[in-house]
Image (spheres, rainbow, N blue to C red):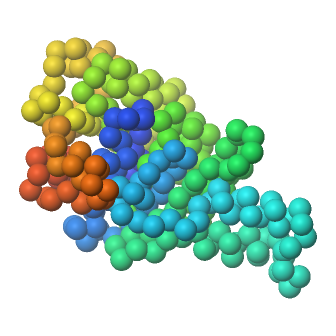
């Protein structure tokens, strides 16, 4: 198989980043762009809910299980620790009809995500070549990118709502990406939840100030809100809704 095209989605919490990520995945699936690996790399994310997927275990859960097995000596006698870990981590891959999914989750105990970050990197590297597309929902602070957890990103999508603060947040993310010389193949801004799909002067000013490359605007769409309130996967709002129409145009403009 040819090289995996990696799409990374980033932005501060509360701007609709994960819902937008879910709609991107929905689009790729409907366009038969698979096989696709979805990676929920945000410890606070609910990408599975946006997609309507049941998660039984995360990489963080398995990391805890492994630590417990080592402490209590319950690793099976006929297996090395490495083989046991590999077997357990393989069980974290969720297989859906149109894509597979890995969920990072969080580790218990003291704050640092170093361990689970390392585990995530190993799993991503292991699976990367098996998929045509990998879509990664990052945490707001771009921890994985700054730590080098992610492989080279082909398409970096910065998601902001229609506010100065949202654009400032992704502006800082863009600055970090440039400073770290991560050189994604392309880096674009998507403005989400724009009233009537229009940007105000203040938001345009911030976009210009940070030198961000705007590829499209997603309008505020009540259907997304209704789906969320009803507990329905918000990635599955109908394709004829304004937000889906706008997203599909962005995906076409990105040649995805």
> Which of the two residues, 181 or 187, is positioned nearer the viewer here?
187
> Going by the image, does 36 lie left or right of 89?
left
Q: Position of residue 126 (x, y in %)?
A: 59, 66
Q: Does residue 212 appear in the picture of this structure?
A: yes
> Which of the two residues, 164 or 129, is positioned nearer the viewer here?
164
Q: Residue furthest front?
A: 230
Q: Residue furthest bottom?
A: 78
Quadrant position of the N terminus in the picture = bottom left
User: Which residue is drawn at the image coordinates 18% and 32% (left, top)?
Assistant: 194
User: Which residue is drawn at the image coordinates 32% and 56% (left, top)?
Assistant: 231
User: Which residue is drawn at the image coordinates 59% and 65% (left, top)?
Assistant: 57
Q: Position of residue 198 (x, y in %)?
A: 12, 28
Q: How many marks?
A: 0
> Going by the image, does 170 lie left or right of 249?
right
> Going by the image, does 243 lie left or right of 127?
left
Image vertical order of residue 195 relative to residue 73, above or below: above
Q: Does residue 154 appear in the picture of this structure?
A: no
Q: Position of residue 99 (x, y in %)?
A: 39, 70
Image vertical order of residue 230 relative to residue 215, above or below: below
User: Which residue is drawn at the image coordinates 14% and 30% (left, top)?
Assistant: 195
Q: Position of residue 245 (x, y in %)?
A: 12, 51
């Amino acid at each position: 198989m040819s090289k995996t095209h990696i799409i990374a989605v980033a932005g501060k919490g509360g701007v609709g980043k994960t819902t937008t990520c879910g709609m991107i995945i929905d689009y790729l699936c409907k366009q038969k762009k698979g096989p696709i690996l979805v990676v929920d790399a945000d410890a606070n994310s609910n990408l599975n809910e946006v997609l309507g997927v049941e998660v039984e275990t995360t990489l963080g859960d398995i990391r805890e299980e492994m630590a417990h097995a080592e402490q209590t000596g319950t690793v099976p006698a006929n297996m090395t620790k490495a083989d046991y870990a590999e077997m357990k981590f393989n069980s974290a891959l969720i297989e859906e009809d149109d894509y597979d999914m890995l969920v990072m989750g969080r580790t218990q105990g003291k704050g640092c995500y170093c361990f689970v970050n390392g585990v995530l990197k190993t799993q991503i590297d292991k699976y990367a070549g098996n998929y045509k597309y990998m879509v990664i929902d990052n945490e707001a602070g771009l921890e994985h990118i700054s730590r080098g957890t992610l492989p080279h990103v082909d398409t970096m999508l910065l998601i902001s709502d229609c506010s100065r603060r949202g654009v400032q947040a992704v502006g800082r993310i863009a600055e970090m990406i440039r400073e770290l010389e991560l050189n994604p193949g392309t880096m674009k801004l998507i403005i989400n939840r724009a009233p009537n799909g229009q940007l105000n002067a203040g938001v345009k000013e911030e976009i210009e100030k940070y030198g961000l490359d705007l590829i499209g605007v997603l309008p505020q769409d009540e259907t997304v809100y209704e789906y969320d309130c009803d507990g329905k996967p918000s990635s599955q709002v109908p394709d004829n809704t304004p937000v889906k129409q706008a997203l599909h145009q962005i995906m076409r403009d990105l040649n995805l």
